[in-house]
Image (cartoon, grey):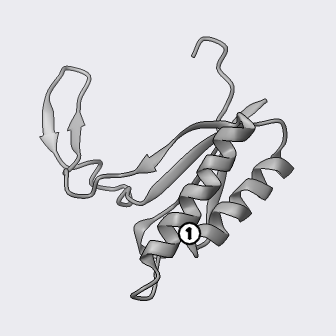
Amino acid sequence: MAKYLISFPSAAMVVPDGEWEAVGRDAHAVIDEAKAAGVYVFGGGIDEGVPPVLVSADGTVAMGGYPWAPRLDGGFTVLELPSRDDAIAWAARIAKACRCDQELRVFGFDPQS
């Protein structure tokens, strides 16, 4: 079994006024289904109200993230699944609930983590 990251940037979630409650309900329903199926690992969204800091190897802290990297925001879900096809199916369910495309990535296996 592998762990899959299903995510979207904030800008991808364009929801018409009046539909946010339905999106929240539908998204939570899919997460509840993933939990019931025993595949849910973790999920949430980046708190965009808290600015990132960059922590160096020597412990120095600087405001902001990597200056050259794209901004990291949006929501994500981590599921543990037996196949990429299963991950694609779950990503489709999340995309339907959130009303936006989802990016799918697999975590590399590290036996020490």
Pick whichever, 68 or 61, lies toward us. 61
The outermost residue toward the top is: 112
Q: In which quarter of the image is residue 92?
A: bottom right
Q: Name the residue rendered at 35%, 60% in the picture.
A: 71
Q: Position of residue 25 (x, y in %)?
A: 52, 65
Q: In this view, does 108 lie above or below 62?
A: above
Q: Name the residue rendered at 14%, 28% in the picture.
A: 60
What secondary structure is found at the residue carrying circle 1? Answer: helix
Is residue 6 in view?
yes
Question: Left or right: where does residue 79 sit relative to residue 76?
Answer: right
The quadrant the C terminus occupies is: top right
* Residue type, numbered disc 1: Cys
Q: Position of residue 64 (x, y in %)?
A: 20, 49
Q: Quadrant of residue 90?
A: bottom right
Q: Position of residue 108 (x, y in %)?
A: 67, 32
Mark 1: few/some/many CA within 10 Å (<14, 14-19, 20+): many
Question: Left or right: where does residue 35 sit relative to residue 60?
Answer: right
For label 1, the residue is 98
Q: Position of residue 97 (x, y in %)?
A: 61, 68
Q: Name the residue rendered at 46%, 56% in the picture.
A: 75
Q: Name the residue rendered at 69%, 39% in the picture.
A: 36
The quadrant the N terminus occupies is: top right
Q: In this view, does 73 lie above or below 113?
A: below
